[in-house]
Amino acid sequence: MGDISGDGLCPSDADAMADPAALLHPLADELLTIAARLRGAAVTPDAADDATRRARTRRAGSGSAHLALARKTYALRRKRAAIFGNPDLFGEPAWDILIDLYIAHAEGKPVSVSSACIGSAAPATTGLRWLGILADEGLLARENDADDNRRVLVRLTPTGLAAMERFFDAAQDAVS
């Protein structure tokens, strides 16, 4: 049925006005993707040296393939939410955090708690709750930033890292 109020809004416009979040979710997902790309591009000389050292010590072959697969997985998750227009349909903040931390580990980059919450593609409170759950499960650790006492960093534990590598091994086997 048409709008009888005479204000000129069609029903779809009225629905969008009633739920502005429906318009903003795809934009937020795109901003998260851009932020992840910018984080990847912002490499300081010290971080580049650390990344180089870590790359040398990584297992030959699987490390770079796992990193590429992790990046694709994260990007596809953001694209899926944007295409379907409702990221709440696919919410897995814990998985998004683990993928983000795996990528950061492989690139030798520190991740702050606030950045990990952004990487969760969920509200900050939800991201914080999942960071606590993942820490309780022994998959990630929090530590004070030695360079900035105001920040707390998060990283995968050896258990979390090993689990992510097993996952990407299985994913590569499934694709091959």
Image (cartoon, rainbow, N blue to C red):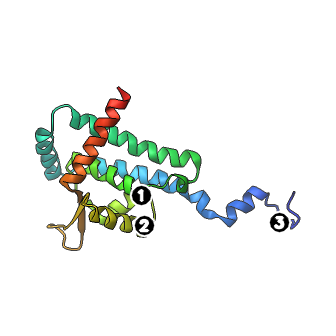
Residue 30: give x, y in percent of width and height.
Answer: 48, 51
Q: Amino acid at mark 1?
A: Pro
Residue 52 picture location, percent across and down: 14, 42
Circle count:
3
From the image, which quarter does the N terminus lie in? Answer: bottom right
Q: Amino acid at mark 3?
A: Asp
Q: Is residue 32 left or right of residue 80?
A: left
**The image quarter in which residue 174 lies:** top left
Q: How many neighbours does mark 2 have within 10 angstroms: few (below 14), some (14-19), or many (20 or more)?
A: some
Residue 93: which numbered mark, if any? 1
Q: Are marks 2 and 3 in contact (CB under 8 Å)?
A: no
The answer to whether any part of residue 42 appears in the image is: no
Say which label, 1 or 3, has the lower sequence index: 3
In depth, the one of 103 and 92 nearer the eye is: 92
Q: Residue tagged by mark 3? A: 7
- The residue at the far bottom in this view is 150
For marks 2 and 1, give the CA distance.
8 Å
Q: Do the CB atoms of the residues marked 2 and 1 lie less than 8 Å apart?
A: yes
Mark 1 crowd level (few <14, some 14–19, many ≥20, 10 Å Cα): many
Q: CA distance from mark 1 to mark 3?
A: 40 Å
Q: Position of residue 135 (x, y in %)?
A: 27, 64
Report which quarter residue 69 is drawn in: top left
Task: Tell me which amino acid carries mark 2.
Answer: Thr
- Mark number, residue 126: 2
Q: Residue at x 45, y 54 (%)?
A: 31
* Label whose residue precedes the other's in the sequence (2 or 3): 3
One can see residue 100 in this view: yes
